[in-house]
Image: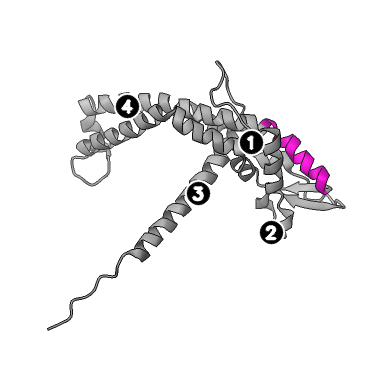
Amino acid sequence: MKLFASLLAAASISTAAALAVPASAQVQGNMATVNLPAAVINTNAFVTAYQQIATTYKPQLDTIRAREQEAQTLLQQLDTNSDNQFDEAEQRAAQGSTQQTRLQAIEQEVTQLTDQVEAARVYAVEQILVQYRPALEQVVQQLNIQVILSPESVIYAPPQANITQQVTAALNTSVPSVAIVPPQNWRPSRNVLAVYQQISQTIAAAQAIQAQQQAAQAAQQQPATQTPAGR
């Protein structure tokens, strides 16, 4: 994943900057907030594209998981003191070992496969983002909005000030579907990569919350351990 990891690291342009207004500006009219990542994630095109990617790129995803498990096993073999840490002494001892050679090969293979999957996802997001500005402007005109702010910059706003759902609805009309196979020599812009990074972080956070909720529910469903009564 070196290619996209390096590109994502370089994509430091804030998407909120495109919608920012000077703090001293005084504007008469409606103000609203919009969550760009959420607007994209909830589109039909995004959901369908990610489902298609999971199917189309299943061989790559399966191989990535298998290689990661293999790498974990190899690292355990090199962890000679079994402390679940790969310290400097163990790294020196591993130099030239068959495990290290295999780990390097795994890293290269996983990087190539991950780049394929990431490219498909970024390409899908890019196609939706092409229509984002027109969709936003459509909602702005319909609701007579004068200023758009990112949710992070607002201390308080009533629920009706959030127009994310309206923007998603407009995107569903303007971009009902997207392709998932990038053309040859395609490279995404830094702005697209910045938004994709925000989308990935949003999804990861939601998945973490869901996992915590499921774990809590499972713990509640387990029967309480009864302490044997004393004789």
The residue beneath circle 1 is 13
Distance from disc 4 to disc 2, alpha carbons, whole Å, reads 47 Å
Query: Start and end of the magenta stretch?
Result: 130-143
| Vertical placement of residue 155 versus 126, above or below | below
Q: Judge by depth and name the residue closer to the eye, 55 or 208.
A: 55
Residue 122: image x %, image y %? 56, 30
Residue 90: image x %, image y %? 23, 36
Q: Is residue 34 visible?
A: no
Distance from disc 2 to disc 1, alpha carbons, whole Å, reads 23 Å
Q: Earlier in the sequence, mark 1 or mark 3?
A: 1
Q: Which residue is outermost to the top?
A: 184
In the rendered image, residue 125 lying in the magenta stretch gets the answer no
Circle 1: is it few (<14), some (14-19), or many (20+) Cα within 10 Å?
A: some
Q: Amino acid at mark 2?
A: Ile
Q: Earlier in the sequence, mark 2 or mark 3?
A: 2
Q: Judge by depth and name the residue closer to the eye, 19 or 158.
A: 158
Q: Which residue is outermost to the right?
A: 28
Q: Earlier in the sequence, mark 2 or mark 1?
A: 1
Q: Say the numbered circle drawn on residue 155.
A: 2
Residue 62: image x %, image y %? 36, 31
Quarter assignment of residue 81: top left
Q: Quadrant of the N terminus?
A: top left
Q: Amino acid at mark 1?
A: Ile
Tell me, yes or no, whether the two marked residues, 4 and 2, touch with CB atoms within 8 Å: no
Tell me, yes or no, whether the two marked residues, 2 and 1, touch with CB atoms within 8 Å: no
Quarter assignment of residue 107: top left
Q: Say the numbered circle drawn on residue 106.
A: 4
